[in-house]
Image (tube, rainbow, N blue to C red):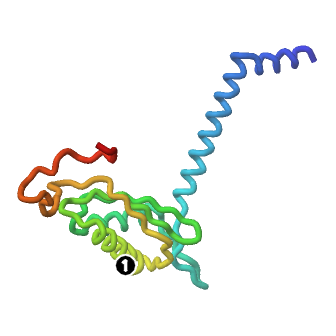
Amino acid sequence: MEDTVQSVECLVAPPGVFWLAGIALLALVGLAAVLRYRANRGGIVPFESEEGRIEISRGTVRSLIEKTVEQMDGIEEARCRLQQKAELAVHLSVTARAPVRLQELDAGIKRRVRSALKTQIGLEAIDSINIRVTDVLGEVDSGPDDAPDGDDAGPPRTGRPD
């Protein structure tokens, strides 16, 4: 009995307790990685009938969305992340080419992605399409010069009173 008590005391005393905490933390990180991997590998089920169902991998859906967006004028690169609960949510990160009108780009991307998912794989249950523009490449058109008669507009405002 005394040997068991000494073994337990060894584990809860300062170097042993750190080893236990490290092993527990490593186990939790490993479990989280496995669960995340399994969640991302799940198929999306757009069709279900009496004869069965068809599952399309998340990678296939992501690839279709990325290729659809990258074929658009004004887009250099697109990366997609999917989230599925009751319906599919699409999260896109895009690199645009200047000149770009963000409102038109947003509407065009959403229209083309919905259309591609519907026509290519029959997926209509899309909750949202969220777009993040991560970069704009090329010369940015600053629009018409707002400075009157060529005067310099001065330094940028900081929001503080002068």
What residue is shown with label 1?
A: 115
* Rendering quarter of residue 21: top right
Location of residue 144 in the rendering, given as x and y in whole percent from the top left corner: 13, 63
Q: Specify the quadrant that holds the N terminus.
A: top right
Q: Is residue 56 above or below residue 77?
A: below
Residue at x-position 29% and y-position 69%: 105
Judged from this view, the residue extending furthest toward the bottom is 50
Q: For numbered disc 1, what is the local secondary structure?
A: helix
Q: 116 left or right of 15?
A: left
Say which of 73 and 117 sits in front. 73
Q: Determine the image quadrant of residue 138.
A: bottom left
Q: Residue at x 13, y 57 (%)?
A: 147
Is residue 126 shown left or right of residue 105?
Answer: right
Residue projecting furthest to the left: 149
Residue 70 is left or right of residue 15, and the answer is left
Is disc 1 surrounded by few (<14), some (14 to 19) or many (20+) residues within 10 Å?
some
Image-quadrant location for residue 106: bottom left
- Residue 112 position, x and y percent, is 33, 75
Residue at the image position 56 percent from the left and 51 percent from the top? 36
Q: Tag 1: residue type?
A: Ser
x%, y% of residue 17? 72, 22
Question: Which quarter of the image is occupied by the C terminus?
Answer: top left
Q: Position of residue 136 (x, y in %)?
A: 24, 55
Q: Is residue 114 above or below residue 64?
A: below
Above or below, comparing residue 156 to residue 105 in the picture: above
Q: Residue lying furthest right in this view? A: 1
Total labels: the figure holds 1
